[in-house]
């Protein structure tokens, strides 16, 4: 894949994730202002669950943003578009789907299985 196209995709994804992360943070700030005094305990539990879910999603966005930053730093080097494990060229279809990926399909599958 062309590096300028890859850079464009990475930067667009970075902006999208940052906007989503901000919206989750803003939602948390607004819900924190609600009083829990008049609410049923089950309602409070539901709100806590939703807040924790939002925080987990925001953490995942943070991980993806870190991966995108690392991918942007790889641009212009021999490492761009190559598997970190075997060194083979990563297929364009995979880079289009996950532009920050560091592994070919085979090695990503191995990582997913081993944790």
Image: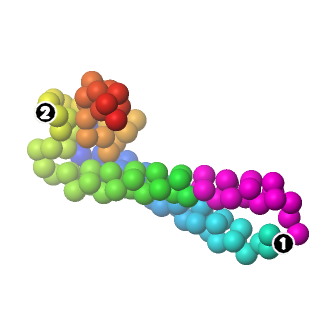
Residue 79 position by quadrant = top left
Name the quarter where the C terminus is drawn: top left
| Image location of residue 45, percent across then percent down | 74, 56
Location of the N terminus by quadrant is top left
Circle 1 SS class = loop
Task: Name the residue that disc number 2 marks.
Answer: 87
- Asked if the residues shown at circle 2 and circle 1 are in contact, with their CB atoms under 8 angstroms apart, the answer is no
Point out residue 82 in the picture as x, y percentages from the top left corner: 18, 36
- Numbered circle sitting on residue 85: none
Q: Is residue 22 visible?
A: yes
Where residue 51 sits, quadrant-wise, is: bottom right
Give the residue number, with chain letter if any, for mark 1: 37
Q: Does the magenta run of residues contain 39?
A: yes
> In this view of the protein, which residue sits in the foreground, 43 or 18?
43
Total numbered badges shown on the rendered structure: 2
Residue positioned 67% across, 53% down in the render? 49
Q: Could you tell me residue 71's position as x and y percent?
A: 27, 50
Comes first in the chain, label 2 or label 1 = 1
Dot 2: element:
loop
């Amino acid at each position: 894949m062309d590096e300028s196209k890859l850079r464009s995709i990475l930067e667009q994804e970075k902006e999208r994730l940052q906007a989503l992360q901000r919206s989750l943070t803003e939602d948390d700030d607004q819900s924190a202002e609600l009083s829990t005094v008049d609410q049923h305990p089950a309602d409070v539990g539901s709100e806590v669950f939703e807040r924790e879910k939002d925080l987990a999603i925001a953490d995942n966005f943070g991980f993806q943003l870190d991966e995108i930053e690392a991918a942007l730093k790889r641009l212009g080097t021999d490492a761009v578009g190559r598997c970190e494990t075997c060194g083979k060229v990563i297929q364009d279809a995979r880079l289009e789907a996950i532009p920050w990926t560091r592994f070919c399909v085979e090695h990503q599958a191995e990582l997913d299985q081993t944790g």
